[in-house]
Image (cartoon, rainbow, N blue to C red):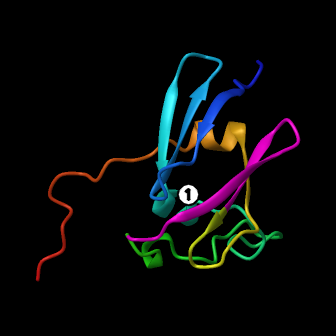
Amino acid sequence: MTTPQPLSIKTSDPTGILIRWSSGETTRFSAQRLRGLCPCARCVNELTGVRMHDPKSVPAQLQQTGARLVGNYGLAVAFSDGHDTGIYSFRYLLDHPEQPEAAGTAQAP
C-alpha cells in the first residue's frame, strides 16, 4: 500500500500545520500536538522505544516556526521552544491525527 503524499503543506499559521494529502484527506496538526509526538532520539529512546519527553509538558501556546520536507518521506518541524530535531514521516503523521480534547477531561481547580 502506497503512503499518501502531501499535495500542500501550509505553515502560515504559527499555531499549527495544515496538510492536504493525495488521498483527498486534509489534516491539521497543532504545534503542541506535533511537539508532543516528536519521534526524535531526544524524545524517544532509540533502543527501547520508550517516550522520554512528556507530551503533557508542552505548553498550549507553543508555535511552529518552520517546516521543511525531508526527502520524499517526511517533514521536519522547528518549534518556538528551540526543538527542531524530529522528522515526522508521512505515514507517522497519517497514523497520528490531531486528537480533539475529550469532553470532561478538564482538571479540577
- Prevailing SS of the magenta stretch: strand
Residue ranking furthest to the front: 12
Nearer to us in this view, 12 or 91:
12
Task: Locate residue 53: give its quadrant.
Answer: bottom right
Could you tell me which residue is drawn at 68 percent across and 53 percent down? 67
Nearer to us in this view, 86 or 1:
86
Residue 71: give x, y in percent of width and height: 88, 42
Could you tell me which residue is drawn at 73 percent across and 65 percent down? 49
Nearer to us in this view, 15 or 102:
15
Task: Locate residue 23: give its quadrant.
Answer: top right
Image vertical order of residue 82 relative to residue 60, above or below: below
> Where does the C terminus fall, quadrant-wise?
bottom left
Nearer to us in this view, 40 or 1:
40
The residue under label 1 is: 34
The range drawn in magenta is 61-77
Residue ranking furthest to the right: 71
Residue 89: give x, y in percent of width and height: 74, 44
Residue 103: give x, y in percent of width and height: 17, 52
Q: Amino acid at mark 1?
A: Leu
Element at badge 1? Answer: helix
Could you tell me which residue is drawn at 74 percent across and 77 percent down? 42
Residue 73 covered by magenta stretch = yes
> Where does the N terminus fall, quadrant-wise?
top right
Residue 28: give x, y in percent of width and height: 47, 41
